[in-house]
Image (cartoon, helix red, strand yellow):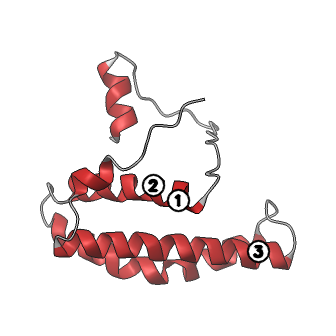
Amino acid sequence: MWSWGQRAHALGHEIAFVAGMQIATPARETWADVKRRWDRQVGQQHAEMVRQPFGKLRFLAKTLAMPVSPLAELPGVLRSRRVPGLREKMLAMVCLTQTRLWRTWRMIQLLVGAVEDEWLAGACVPYTH
């Protein structure tokens, strides 16, 4: 359970699956916003995974898969009706690849001890509107 789920649970809210539920989150407006979001998520994922049996090994496997993972997304992006036109689909793939490479970089930094997961997990300023 990630931080928002932990906070909701602490406030007495129940986490439940609702079939057909869709949740929309606001788009990040800048590349810095995107990086902050993924820094937080990667830091949280690392902190959670390393506490589990074989967690460091699993995190290493995930790190190795990350830079090639956009290839698995290509068919879905090309078939998507939400992204019109070939140019837009290619731009979506560029953005996806750029984001996955950023995540890979941060994951490598965590693996070699260049950054701490607590620092990354706190990297995102909460979104308020």
Residue depicted at x 32% and y 41%: 1
In front of the other: 109 or 14: 109
Residue depicted at x 36% and y 50%: 123
Q: Nearer the viewer, mark 2 or mark 3?
A: 2
Q: Position of residue 23 (x, y in %)?
A: 61, 39
Q: Are marks 1 and 2 in contact (CB under 8 Å)?
A: yes
Cα–Cα span, label 2 and label 3: 24 Å
The kind of residue on which mark 1 rests is: Ala
Cα–Cα span, label 1 and label 2: 6 Å
Q: Position of residue 64 (x, y in %)?
A: 34, 82
Q: The C terminus is located in which quarter? A: top right
Q: Residues within 10 Å of mark 2 (few under 14, many from 20)?
A: some
Q: Is residue 81 left or right of residue 101?
A: right
Q: Position of residue 94 (x, y in %)?
A: 65, 78
Sooner in the amino-acid sequence: mark 2 or mark 3: 2
Q: Position of residue 48 (x, y in %)?
A: 23, 52
Q: Residue beneath label 3, please?
A: 89
Q: Residue beneath label 2, please?
A: 36
Q: Residue beneath label 1, please?
A: 32
Sooner in the amino-acid sequence: mark 1 or mark 3: 1
Q: Secondary structure at mark 3?
A: helix
Depicted 67 relative to depicted 5: above or below: below
Q: Secondary structure at mark 1?
A: helix
The kind of residue on which mark 2 rests is: Arg
Q: Is residue 58 something one can see in this rendering?
A: no
Residue 41 sits in quarter: bottom left
